[in-house]
Amino acid sequence: MANTRKGKQVLNVKPPDAARALAVVEGDMIASIGENRKLIVFPREQLPEMTRGSGVRLQRYKDGGLSDVKTFAAREGLTWVDAAGRGFSLGARELADWRGNRADAGRIAPKGFPRSNLFAPPASIRANEGKN
């Protein structure tokens, strides 16, 4: 949550709801992965503009919730970095199995996707790289 200069909140959530992810929009596709390791990729056009104080469902979950979200350009493909700092990438053709509609359940993440269910390692891990 954040405040503007006038003191108004940008996002209002009521318990037991909670804000789960924040992403900078760069590209025309969105990838969402849940705590259940299911990944869904859908076009940005399917994501409605959020009305003040409410959220938008990105993915449907039977158990758990959202783990991470990332936007990317379809022509560049989906990329992620594992905890060891290795980069992985899947092109548009390779992502066909995970393409769907917003709020679908998705499919199990591809081979090589981090067990942390994050597209990039946490900042604390990145900050400690090279210090050993």
Image (cartoon, rainbow, N blue to C red):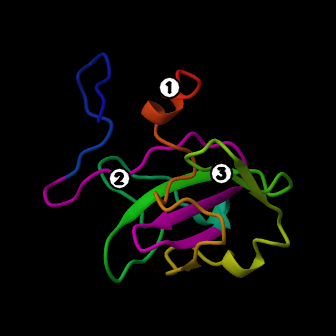
Residue 42 to residue 125: above or below: below
Amino acid type, mark 2? Arg
Q: Please, what is the dominant secondary structure of the magenta stretch?
A: loop
- The residue carrying pointer 1 sits among few (fewer than 14), some (14 to 19) or many (20 or more) residues within 10 Å by Cα, namely few
Query: At 55% across and 59% down in the image, what residue appears?
Result: 114
Q: Which quadrant would residue 61 be assigned to in this image?
A: bottom left
In the image, the segment drawn in magenta is 14-41
Of marks 3 and 2, which one's residue comes earlier in the chain?
A: 2
Residue identifier under label 3: 80
In contact (CB < 8 Å): disc 3 and disc 2: no
Amino acid type, mark 1? Ala
Residue 94 in the figure: left or right of residue 22: right
Q: Nearer the viewer, residue 78 or 112?
A: 112
Of marks 1 and 3, which one's residue comes earlier in the chain?
A: 3
Residue 27 in the image: state x and y as whole percent: 72, 48
- 57 magenta-colored: no
* Distance Cα–Cα, label 3 vs label 2: 19 Å
Disc marking residue 23: none
Query: At 73% across and 54% down in the image, what residue appears?
Result: 88
Residue 108 in the image: state x and y as whole percent: 56, 79
Residue 96 in the figure: left or right of residue 60: right
SS class, disc 3: strand
Residue identifier under label 2: 20
Q: Nearer the viewer, residue 119 or 128?
A: 128
Residue 98 in the image: state x and y as whole percent: 67, 76
Quick one: which residue is furthest to the front in this view?
132
Of marks 2 and 1, which one's residue comes earlier in the chain?
A: 2
Residue 15 in the image: state x and y as whole percent: 13, 56
